[in-house]
Image: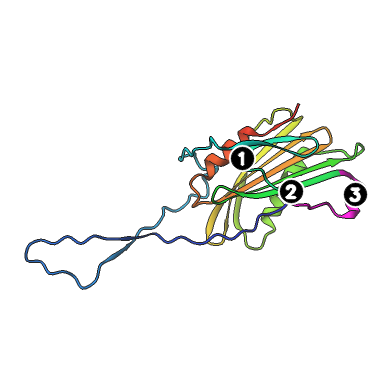
Amino acid sequence: MIFLSMRYPTFLFLVLAGTFWACGQEKPDTTPVINVEKPAVDPQVFPPPVTVQSDRSGWREAQYGSKPLILMTEKKMPNTGERVPENARVYIEENDTWSANLGEDLQMVLNMVTYKPDVRLDLAAIHQFALGQFRDNPAVSGMQSRAGVIEVPGAGGSARLDGILFRDGLYHYFCVITAVRGQTVWQLSMIYPETYEAGPGDVEAIAASMRMVE
């Protein structure tokens, strides 16, 4: 599956301190500057709690693929046109990939692969493969993950992974959801930096909307 590689800037929060005078006090030559640092992220706490209740009333459902999967997001993700290598065609009937940046800093990739009838599918193995795509990126360090809980309506089986990794000077949270129906496998990957406060809520809202067309 595809690893998202957008780089995020490092944010510096500066607060200009006001200066208060008492009668007879002299004004200082320069205005003091106080550096206010964001509390350090605890890499053991993930997924992070939902603390921002964003307005998602404008989000809309969209269908993806010939064996449709439904997701609710602020906009429909475009098809990337990516296809599996030619030597894999012996195992695969159909595949598609969609990708987009949603909200301010949430990156998403949705993969769909339909395997030929004689291919035996192992949901656990397919699900774990996504971790390798994150871990093998040389810019990533300190990656941790754990199994979550999800039930995708209409799927024959589903699994969730939540995790955290360090990249580009920031911690990033990620969530991977894999669902299988017949010979079709769907995998949704979402990742956002620690600075994106709406990220936890966006991920949970999207995950809750995920379902197969009956």
Q: Quadrant of residue 116?
A: top right
Q: Residues within 10 Å of mark 2 (few under 14, many from 20)?
A: some
Front residue of 157 and 193:
193
Check residue 79 in the rendering and tell me which mark sits there, or answer none: 2
Instruction: Decide if residue 26 is on the left or right side of residue 3.
Output: left
Q: Residues within 10 Å of mark 3 (few under 14, many from 20)?
A: some
Q: Quadrant of the C terminus?
A: top right
Q: Position of residue 79 (x, y in %)?
A: 74, 48
Q: Amino acid at mark 1?
A: Thr
Dot 3 or dot 2: first in sequence order is 2
Residue at the extreme top: 214
Residue pointed to by mark 1? 73
Residue at the extreme left: 24
Mark 3 or 2: in front is: 2
Q: Position of residue 91 (x, y in %)?
A: 90, 45
Q: Position of residue 180 (x, y in %)?
A: 77, 35
